[in-house]
Amino acid sequence: MADAQAVAVGAFDRDTAVQLESQDGATRRFSAVVAEGWRAGPGPHGGYLSALLLRALMESVGDPQRSPRSLTIHFLSPPHPGPAQVTTTIEREGRSLSSLSARMEQDGKLVALVLAAFSSPWPGSDISEIEMPSVAPPDPGREPGTLIVQNGPEFARHITLQRRLGGMPFADPSQPMETGGWLGLAEPRPIDALSLAFFCDALIPTPFMRATQPEPAPTVDITIHFRAVTPRSEHPDPEELCLARVRGGLIHEGFFEEDTLIWASDGTLLAQSRQLALMLQLPSQ
């Protein structure tokens, strides 16, 4: 059985794995490997790192009834492929809500700082004024590596994307800074908090809709709010795609923001995020 489970592990779960090395009270130290194949510009993709960090936090909480609710990451410098260490601390554990911090280090250098909240559901009214866009349903089948075909970054081979929102990048400098579509991992896998953390930073930067050529666009910080417990059923469909919409609005002094909303196919809002990133101009030739 163990061998069968090992074979079933896909690239996403393999490359975001962490190993508990030691524990001292509320603090746990994990080893990890920043894997090859997830590069986006000068370093590993931020969404991939978000998923790896979230996995360490989830293992630190160790309670499936306490789901991720909020994750904020400040990226200090891009790590390189190779060994890394993640240290988590449960700052406070209440009857329903756990608050944690984490630090990711590589070669003795701090590369990311994290704050997170985990909680069981609370009773209350369900009210939503956030509507899922009306778009065509997903196409049958999954075409992996969609963005690689369109000269996308290395990490894009791990996703499948069916465009439904926004125009084409580098095509029209007057078009809105918006993009989106049906999104999933190239290897079929149920949607959960780990994949949502990745998806919140998986689509092309919205300033590329106005730009004439790609530029490095590293994330400074990202906050993700998980709005539904996932997986949402005991037997989730590994083929399910989610609908992601990303909008920008301002580029100023090199910085731009992006707001991402992700829905399940039935219209349930799964996650929302905001990130601040930098648009770095390449040296002129």
Image (cartoon, rainbow, N blue to C red):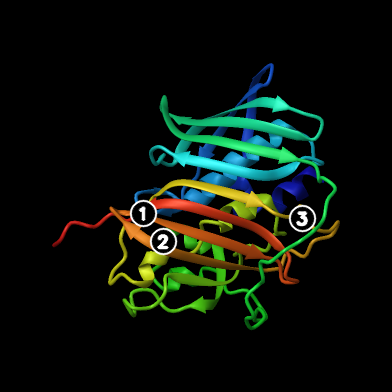
Q: First in sequence, mark 1 or 2: give its number.
A: 1
* Badge 2 element: loop
Position of residue 204 measured from the top left corner of the image (x, y, whole percent): 44, 65
Query: Residue sitting at 62 percent across and 38 percent down?
Result: 116
* Badge 3 element: loop
Q: First in sequence, mark 3 or 2: give its number.
A: 2
Select label 3 or label 2 by which is in front.
Answer: 3
Q: Where, quadrant-wise, is the C terminus in this rendering?
A: bottom left
Residue receiving disc 2: 153
Against 162, residue 159 (above or below) is: above
Q: Amino acid at mark 1?
A: Gly
261 or 17, nearer to the observer: 261
Query: Residue sitting at 75 percent across and 71 percent down?
Result: 266
Mark 3, Cα crowd under 10 Å, few <14 / some 14-19 / many 20+, is few
Residue that extends furthest to the left in the rendered view of this protein: 285
Q: Is residue 148 left or right of residue 269?
A: left
Against 166, residue 254 (above or below) is: above
Q: Is residue 180 left or right of residue 193?
A: left
Question: Between marks 3 and 2, how big is the CA–CA gap?
Answer: 28 Å
Residue 127 visible at all: yes
Task: Tell me the tag on residue 229.
Answer: none
Mark 1, Cα crowd under 10 Å, few <14 / some 14-19 / many 20+, is some
Query: Residue sitting at 83 percent across and 59 percent down?
Result: 233
173 or 236, nearer to the observer: 173
Residue receiving disc 3: 231
Position of residue 222 measured from the top left corner of the image (x, y, whole percent): 50, 48
Residue receiving disc 1: 41
Quarter where residue 109 is shown: top left
